[in-house]
Image (cartoon, helix red, strand yellow):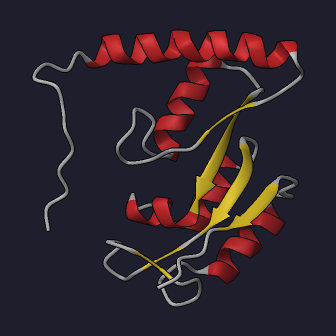
Amino acid sequence: DKIRLQTPDHVDWPQIWTRLTGVLRECLVRARRYNLDLLVEPHYHSIIPDTATFQLMWNELGDPAFQLTADTGWGSQQAEYPPMMVYRMQQHLKILQFRDVDGQTRKFVPFGEGVVDTEAVVRALKDVGFTGYVSLEEVFM
């Protein structure tokens, strides 16, 4: 199976990035007004597809209220090793969603039946002093 996404005929990446940055800055103004954080979750089909791109955006925004929701399954599909996502994003990580994925990282599978190293992720969370939230996203087959 091929992964196919609808893309426009012309992609002006600098314009897209600048526009998103502006929107996120405005959202952060509103979030701070109510003493809230603004969380984003990377997905491969979005402008912020992984934790490296999140870090680029965070470096540009430089706002502590800009936080991350990460997903062990989506991270695996992005060829990111979930424990390293935790170590890399420790100061930005607010929510970690546990989800498992098959060995080809093509589909989500019931928790514990895939390739996500849950013990290593939990160890990483402890190592970085994680104080956010963990959720379990289960697939029922």
Residue at 51% across, 15% down:
21
Quadrant assignment, res 65: top right
Q: Residue at x 76, y 62 (%)?
A: 134
Residue 2 higher or lower than 20, as above or below: below
Instruction: Identify the residue at image location x=71%, y=17%.
Output: 28
Quadrant housing the N terminus: bottom left
Name, please, the residue furthest toward the left.
Answer: 9
State how many labels appear: 0
Of the pair 85 and 110, the residue shown nearer to us: 110
Q: Nearer the viewer, residue 34 or 60?
A: 34
Given the current orientation, which residue lies at the most extreme front position?
Answer: 141
Viewer-nearest residue: 98 or 61: 98
Q: What is the x, y in percent for residue 59?
A: 59, 24
Rendered position, 22 above or below 83 = above
Relative placement, left or right, of 46 versus 36 is left
Classify residue 104 by image quadrant: bottom left
| Percent coordinates x, y for residue 17 in the rendering | 40, 18
Residue placed at 88% from the left, 54% from the top?
131
User: Which x, y percent locates residue 40?
Assistant: 60, 37
Residue 19 falls in which quadrant of the image? Answer: top left
Q: Is residue 95 left or right of residue 47?
A: right
Looking at the picture, does residue 3 appear above or below residue 37?
Answer: below
